[in-house]
Image (cartoon, rainbow, N blue to C red):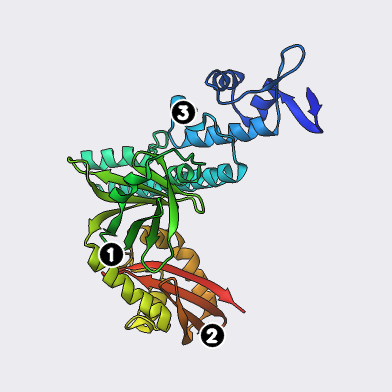
Amino acid sequence: MSGHAHDEVLITALECAERIGITVRALRLYEQHGLISPRRTSKQWRLYGRNEITRLNEILALKTLGLSLRDIEKLLRNHSTDLTHTLSLQRDALKETRTRAEHGLQVIDALQAKIGSGAVVSIDDLTHLARETNMIESSKDTPAWRRYEQMRPRTEVVMDPARFTSFAGAYSTDDGTISLVSERDGKLFYRIVGQQDIGIFPESEDRFFMKELPVQISFNRDGNGNIQSLIHHQGGFEDHAQKMDLNLARSIEQKVTQRIEDQRPMPDSELILRRVIEDHARGEPDIDGMSPGLGILATEQKNFIQSELERAGPVKALSFKGVSYGLDIYDVEFENSKMEWGFAQTFRGKISHLYLRPTF
């Protein structure tokens, strides 16, 4: 059975359940938890349209990540569904499921080979097998979940501006990425060294968010209530940074600012980039030489980048273009194509930013 409202096709609960592959009972359960609100006919038949089915996609994707209905209820309360965000969540969840399946198959293949060789299967082998092949239990502590949570709309709360000074200071991650938090005219600002200030707004006592970007900054206190560290939440990752000497941070930032003004590359900049390109061409990016977040991305994308570099052919020439937001930018001419590459290093020598794009 179908109906129309404003030219929208509506389907019954039975049709909805059959098409999606769930039970009518599950639909009723989601409704009881306030997760969906199907429309009703004059005879009180439930009807499902585009909005309800979009929300069902979001619910099922969150269940894939291991969230309970109670968790999902708290998460979605008073928030409308954004199809773009839901599609990203579903894509990330499926990619993680595929990765876990591939790891599980590798464990099975190795164990079969061990049995075939006549070796004894140990308890460690069996527990490892159970962990790597368990596709039911999922964890919320995954990039897909964190990326989804970070993309959700935030609500600003009222906070006394006099409290903002307690968050001000310099913070550094283990790999040497420095961020600066400052108070100005009753507002709080955040920036990574070499970049511009962006306003951050409170959503709870120690948690702030950017309105311009899907980024949150949460602060941690010590036993005396003093701010000792922060976490930068972005892109499914969490970068932990400890408070550092403010004068040292400003000295490092001044050097970066001067390089930007002079349009001067970092020492050994070209050699570093050549090595990065060579590593990726072999399919062996130097993960230890990168910040943790970049290392994860490099691992995920190494096959794609390697294939692009195989098509591009050998490097013929590098030409320095300038410095932008602390990144050294180069035109790279390959045998078969041209690309622009950009990268930045922290003061501890770790590559924190890296990108490439084709040029014509």
Q: Nearer the viewer, mark 2 or mark 1?
A: 1
Q: In this view of the protein, can residue 91 be seen by the observer? A: yes
Q: Circle 2 sits in a helix, a strand or a loop, which is it?
A: loop
Q: List x then y, in percent, for residue 17.
A: 64, 25
Depth check: give the residue in front, 65 or 157. 157
Q: Which mark is residue 335?
A: 2
Instruction: Say which amino acid is labelled 1.
Output: Gly
Q: Within the image, what quadrant is residue 40 found in?
A: top right
Q: Is residue 130 above or below residue 31?
A: below
- Residue 316 % position (x, y): 48, 88
User: Callout 2 environment at 10 Å: few (<14), some (14 to 19), or many (20+)?
Assistant: few
Query: In the figure, 45 relative to 340: above or below?
Result: above
Residue that numbered label 3 is attached to:
74
In-front residue for pair 89/129: 89
Q: Is residue 198 above or below residue 18?
A: below
Query: Which residue in the structure is indicated by mark 1?
Result: 176
Q: Secondary structure at mark 1?
A: loop
Q: Is residue 328 above or below residue 115?
A: below
Residue positioned 80% across, 25% down in the render = 3
Residue 122 visible, this angle: no
